[in-house]
Each structure stands twice: as C-alpha cells, then as structure tokens.
Image (cartoon, grey):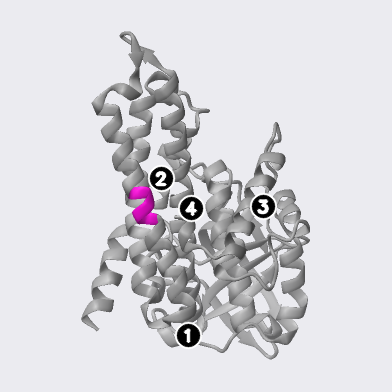
C-alpha cells in the first residue's frame, strides 16, 4: 500500500508512527494534551492536506480506534470555520482550535433528528442584533471537554429547510448545560453528551454562513466526516490484524501454533484482503476530494460503508482467534469489537450510505 503514497506522505506516516511509539508508552490518554502534542510536533497544521490528516487518523486509530471520533470532530469543525466562517469567526476560533487552546464540539443530532437533519427542533429567534437559542441536543461529540460548540437551529417554521442555520457558541454560559458523558457501547475515550440550551443569547456575529445555510454546512461536514470514519475503521482493521498475527504465532495448541491451522489462516487472509480494499477506497475518496469533487459523496459513502462493515466483521473474528484473551475487556480486540459497531452508525448509518451511493449513481 505504501506504493500509492508519494515520498512526502511516506515520511509523514513514518514520523507519526515514531511519535505514537513515544507518546503512548505507559501514558493515560488526555485528548486535549494529545492534540496539543500533535500540533507542537507539526502533525497538525493549517496547511495540512486532507491526506495528511487521514494518515494521522489512521495511525492513531491503529493504537486506539476511539480517538478517531475526537479527531473527526476537531477536523470537521476546523473545516466548517475555514469554509463558512467570516473573518471575525476565523480570528476568534481558528488559531485556538489548531493549537489545542480550544477544543470544539459538533452538535447536530437531536432526539427526533438523526439521519433526517430537517427534523431539527432547536430554535433561534432574532432579537435586534442578538439570537435567542433554545433546544436539546444529543450525541454531541467532545461535549464535556469542549470550549465552544458548532450547532444548528431552526430560524423559521418547523421542518423548513431554508431556516436551518449554523452557529458557534462558547460553552462558558449558565444557559448551556452539558450533561455527563453518555455511556455507550464503544468509542468510549471520546465523550458524547446531551446538551440543553435554554434562553441563550448570542450575538449575530456568532452566526456561521447565511440564514438557511445550515443543511449545506452540516452535510458538507458529514461528507468529510465519513472519510475520517473510514480512516478510523482502516486503523482499527490494521490494529486487529497485527494482534491476530502476533497471538496466533505465539499461541500453541495440540503441539503447534494456531497459525498453522487452516481456519485461523482463512480468518487472517480475509482480514488482510479487506484491509487493503478498505484502504484503497479510503485513499480514492481522499483523492476525489481534491481532484473530482462530484464523486466525493459517492466515494466517501463507499469507503465508510465498506470499511466499517469490514471492521465489524473482522473484529468479531479477531475475538474468536484470541479466544479467552479476546474476551478480556481491556484487550485491543475487545475494544475494537465494541468500537466497530459504533462506526457503522455515526456519520450516517450504513443503510444511509447505501442510499447515498445509489442516489449518486441514478443522478
């Protein structure tokens, strides 16, 4: 797979791997500290290409797949501000976001608005030069560790697409209540939170883009988010393949290593095949972002659907290969098993990805 990368990307990937070996040695992970360290060592930069950010995500998720949701959120919020924020918003938030002085939260989903973002019930009412926001958000990534939230509210009547608008809101207000981290099956290292917003007044300067741009902004972030989700799955697949090879060559049963048994060899052969296929689709989606924008939605959905489906299938097989060791809650493959199921759901369920792919084809 290295043959597909230019020399600069190979060097970048090698340096990231060296950083990971040093950073994760007997160290409890603090996401803000991790982001700051990545910025300090020049792995995060305003000038980074999407490919560099994807290679970074893939490498870190080989170490701990759940980190991918944190990275996805930070990169998605960065892209929203860069693409749609005015100069005041960029100067207030962008530099602090890159350096890790500020951590961002992406908050779109609501109890009645998931895959269908037109169902948003959070409201924003204009009062002179201020907006009054009220609403209830769920599954807000990075909610409990963030300094500001990128969120979406309805400025017109319910289900009116032309009224959904994007806002950036600081969390240092008594009118915002971030509830404790939501316990979830996997991706536990990245917090997900319910957020209650009651009578929050913010300046019109906190509006991102124009009134009614919210759907466009949200979908652009989700489109890129699917590529990052695919990178998370590829990192996970690489991690479980490594664990399975290591375990099967060391584990002896009935007088020989279990790697000599055909059943184990077939598991690992399938895992290797799907890892390479997933990585190829991922890199093709990244290429499309910069070279063929009309194909990004289709290829991003294909990469997300294929890689996360493969991650779920093979992480289950990895637990089977490791046997009792794979049942230990602290083991990498047990974590990957839990995380892989989550990957099939966020950034649009895999059923939604099929709809996106077919829609793009029929258009």
Residue 275 included in the magenta stretch of the image:
yes
State the residue position of label 3. 15
Q: Which residue is mark 4?
A: 232
Q: Is residue 240 left or right of residue 43?
A: left
Spatial separation of the CA atoms under disc 1 and disc 4? 33 Å
For residue 24, above or below residue 154: above
| Res 351 → quadrant | bottom left
Q: Is residue 141 visible?
A: no
Going from N to C along the chain, the mark reached first, 2 or 4, is 4
Marks 4,3: beta carbons within 8 A: no
The residue identified by callout 1 is 163
Looking at the rendered image, the disc whose residue lies closer to the viewer, 3 or 1, is: 3
Q: What residue is shown at x 77% (from left), y 67% (from top)?
A: 96
Please state, as top left, top right, bottom left or bottom right, where the N terminus lies in the image: bottom left
Give whichever of discs 4 and 3 has the lower sequence position.
Answer: 3
The mark nearer the N terminus, 3 or 2, is 3
Q: Please tell me which of labels 1 and 4 falls first in the chain.
A: 1
Disc 1 versus disc 4: nearer the observer? 4
**Residue linked to disc 2:** 340
């Amino acid at each position: 797979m290295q043959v597909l990368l230019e020399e600069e990307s190979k060097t970048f990937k090698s340096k990231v791997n060296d950083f990971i070996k040093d950073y994760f040695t007997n160290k409890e992970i603090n996401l803000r500290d991790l982001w700051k360290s990545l910025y300090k060592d020049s792995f995060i930069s305003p000038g980074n290409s999407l490919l560099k950010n994807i290679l970074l995500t893939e490498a870190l998720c080989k170490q701990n797949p759940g980190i991918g949701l944190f990275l996805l959120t930070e990169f998605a919020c960065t892209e929203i501000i860069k693409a749609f924020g005015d100069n005041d918003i960029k100067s207030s938030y962008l530099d602090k976001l890159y350096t890790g002085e500020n951590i961002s939260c992406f908050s779109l989903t609501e109890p009645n608005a998931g895959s269908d973002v037109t169902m948003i019930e959070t409201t924003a009412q204009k009062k002179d030069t201020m907006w009054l926001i009220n609403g209830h958000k769920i599954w807000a990534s990075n909610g409990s560790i963030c300094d500001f939230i990128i969120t979406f509210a309805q400025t017109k009547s319910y289900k009116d697409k032309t009224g959904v608008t994007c806002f950036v809101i600081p969390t240092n207000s008594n009118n915002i209540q971030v509830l404790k981290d939501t316990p979830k099956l996997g991706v536990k290292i990245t917090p997900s939170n319910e957020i209650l917003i009651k009578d929050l007044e913010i300046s019109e300067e906190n509006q991102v883009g124009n009134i009614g741009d919210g759907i466009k902004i949200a979908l652009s972030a989700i489109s890129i988010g699917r590529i990052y989700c695919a990178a998370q799955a590829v990192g996970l697949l690489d991690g479980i393949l490594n664990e399975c090879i290591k375990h099967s060559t060391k584990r002896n049963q009935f007088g020989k290593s279990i790697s000599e048994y055909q059943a184990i060899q077939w598991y690992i052969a399938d895992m290797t095949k799907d890892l390479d296929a997933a990585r190829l689709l991922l890199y093709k989606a990244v290429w499309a972002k910069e070279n063929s924008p009309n194909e990004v939605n289709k290829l991003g959905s294909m990469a997300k659907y294929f890689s996360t489906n493969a991650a779920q299938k093979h992480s289950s097989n990895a637990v089977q290969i490791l046997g009792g060791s794979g049942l230990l809650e602290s083991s990498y493959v047990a974590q990957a098993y839990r995380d892989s199921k989550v990957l099939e759901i966020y950034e649009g369920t895999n059923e939604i990805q099929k709809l996106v792919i077919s829609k793009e084809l029929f258009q």
